[in-house]
Image (cartoon, rainbow, N blue to C red):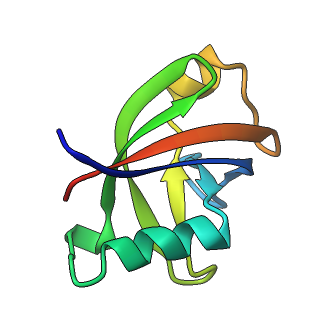
Amino acid sequence: MPRIGSFDFAAQLWLYPGEGGWHFVSLPDDVSADIADSLAGIRRGFGSVRVDATVGATSWRTSIFPDPRSRAYVLPVKRAVRTAEHLDADNEIRVHLEILDP
């Protein structure tokens, strides 16, 4: 699958308040802006963007989503990744993202 860009950053893992226990990483403002600029005019459901994500030695395919409150994209970090990489909420993690062609 063609890739349109890659990004490396560090960010804090956080737990969404409420039922379900979803964990996310908010992409830095500059990374979010670069992604939004590169995909201007391209819309998928909920503004999602397909990505290949890597944290530590674990890689997975998922989507990032715009968060209207923070105006940044958020990356869901599934339980299998958190378990494999021994991650908990409030840990700072290094992320490598490959943005996939929409």
Q: Is residue 32 left or right of residue 59?
A: right
Q: Position of residue 65 (x, y in %)?
A: 42, 64
What's the residue at 21%, 76% (across, down)?
43
Position above or below: 52 against 50: above
Q: Position of residue 3 (x, y in %)?
A: 28, 46
Q: Is residue 98 left or right of residue 81?
A: left
Q: Is residue 34 left or right of residue 82?
A: left
What's the residue at 68%, 51% (across, down)?
15
Position above or below: 23 against 60: below
Q: Position of residue 21 (x, y in %)?
A: 59, 46
Q: How many marks?
A: 0
- The image quadrant that residue 71 belongs to is bottom right
What's the residue at 41%, 76% (across, down)?
36
Which corner quadrant holds the C terminus?
Answer: bottom left
What's the residue at 71%, 51% (across, down)?
14
Q: Is residue 56 left or right of residue 93?
A: left
Position above or below: 52 against 7: above
Which corner quadrant holds the N terminus?
Answer: top left
- The image quadrant that residue 37 belongs to is bottom left
